[in-house]
Image (spheres, rainbow, N blue to C red):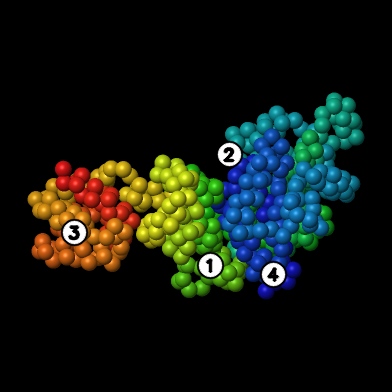
Amino acid sequence: MTDNVRVRIAPSPTGPIHIGNVRTALFNWLYARHNKGKFILRFEDTDQARSKSEFEDIIMKELRWLGMQWDEGPDTDGSYGPYRQTEKLEIYQKHAEQLLEEKKAYLCYCSPEEIEKERSDSAKKGEAFRYSGKCRNLNEEEKKDKIGSGIKPSVRFKVPSGKDIVIDDLVRGKVEFSSDMLGDFVIIRPDGMPIYNYAVVIDDYDMKITHVIRAEEHISNTPRQVLLYEALGFEIPRFAHASMVLGPDRTKLSKRHGAAFVGQYREDGYLPEALVNFLALLGWSPEGEEEIMPVDELVQKFTLDRIAKNPGIFDIQKLNWMNGHYIRKSSDERILDLALPHLKKAGYLDEEFYTDNREWLMQVIAVVKDNLEYVGQIKEHAKLFFQEKVEMEDKKAEDVLKEETVPLVLRTLHKKIEGASDSIRQDEVKGLLKEVNKELKLGGKKVFMPIRVALTGQTHGPELYQVIPLLGKEKVQQRLLEALK
Ligand code: GLU
């Protein structure tokens, strides 16, 4: 265990939280819990045009749904706040003034057009853009001119030249950069808003963050941040850059690969514990082959040294398999609750039907649950219990009923069921089916497949002895007669 661990995630509330960021949040949360440390949520909301409080609410809701409760954040009392960047502008300003005073930063009067010109000139030469440093050494007279012209300056950090920056990354090992690759960079914009690389350093310092665990895409930002830590005289936290989460085609995970946001998974009927288990294994693995790991076990096993350097590949098949496992382990009651909106949406039932038939619905769930990968699939799997008329699922099903022996099979069963008790039970059905099979001597397949298709329209599905009692005597007889037509 590492002492006094304080980790954080710092999403921008400019949209719902992306699944890749949820994975990063989970790594932080697991690390905090494993070390009995603190997990902190704060918002990088300096993009005022795009930041919305609704998105903050969504992000908090998703994290809570997944069980990643934070110890400090914008909605809790915490001693190291504020936990929103727009509430800290004075603090960023204060440190910038210190850097200006110590000549570690300077005011830059370059207009966006001038910077754009420098950028396109470098692009033409095929070089990476670095600010020329034009405003670094303005003399007093030039400064006066600029001030007189009313241009609002930005604050730019003076990058020391010829300096090697070595990051001892807990995942990637030593990563080296030269300060000569970096041009002087803006830390505060003319409108007073801090730039990410600067604000993040102040925030991590203010919040006493011990470990910065984030995605690899930020490693190129890290040397700038390290220079700022040094210039400000702050202790540098440990860094751990986890690999990215990619789609099966090895591009950044997006809508094309399925849902990229947590909310969609919740709506489709994925269970939070399945997502947590699945996401934890995207770029991290404990020793051994076991993949089903409830959250307590993840917490107990989570260490940074087992974060992979290679990207985590988002395999929806694996998520579906895992989710199916957690569905099977859940109570019928829980799955029914989750299935209800899907059943309503499919037009299978309304609130009144639900209230009147809860017991029966629970049995339907018990029968179809084992085949669900996510609860939204209930629409297909439970259809046979709700449809007025059996619809043939495919050509294969249609063909089954065309066989010569089918009328005999269906008629025989119809007759048997006639004599059965009204509340026909599973063991009774088992007996009946056995009798039919024995009498006809056609072989099991020629008997049971047509019955299945006649009753459900499908060539697969739950056991007949489970289906028949749930449909009830009357419906079964109706369906058999309908198929005989
Ligand atoms: N807003 C950044 C992100 O969510 C924060 C990066 C960081 O953790 O430093 O990617």
| Residue with the mark numbered 3 | 416
**x and y percent of residue 277 in the render?**
52, 62
In the rendered structure, find residue 36 and report the number of the disc placed on it: 4
Marked residue nearer the N-terminal end (2 or 3) = 2
* Residue plotted at (62% across, 46% down): 58
* Residue plotted at (68% across, 39% down): 52
How far apart, in angstroms, are the residues tagged by discs 2 and 1?
Answer: 51 Å
Marked residue nearer the N-terminal end (4 or 2) = 4
- Front tag of 2 and 3: 3
| Left or right of 429, for residue 82 | right
In the rendered structure, find residue 126 and report the number of the disc placed on it: 2
Tag 3: Cα neighbours inside 10 Å, few (<14), some, or many (≥20)?
some
Q: Secondary structure at mark 3?
A: helix
Check the image and report above or below for 88 versus 166. above
The image quarter in which residue 171 lies: bottom right
Check the image and report above or below for 274 versus 386. below
Name which residue type carries label 1: Pro
* Residues at circles 2 and 3 in contact by the CB criterion of under 8 Å: no
**x and y percent of residue 155 in the render?**
80, 40
How far apart, in angstroms, are the residues tagged by discs 1 and 3?
Answer: 48 Å
**x and y percent of residue 72 in the render?**
74, 57
- Front tag of 1 and 3: 3
| Residue with the mark numbered 1 | 294
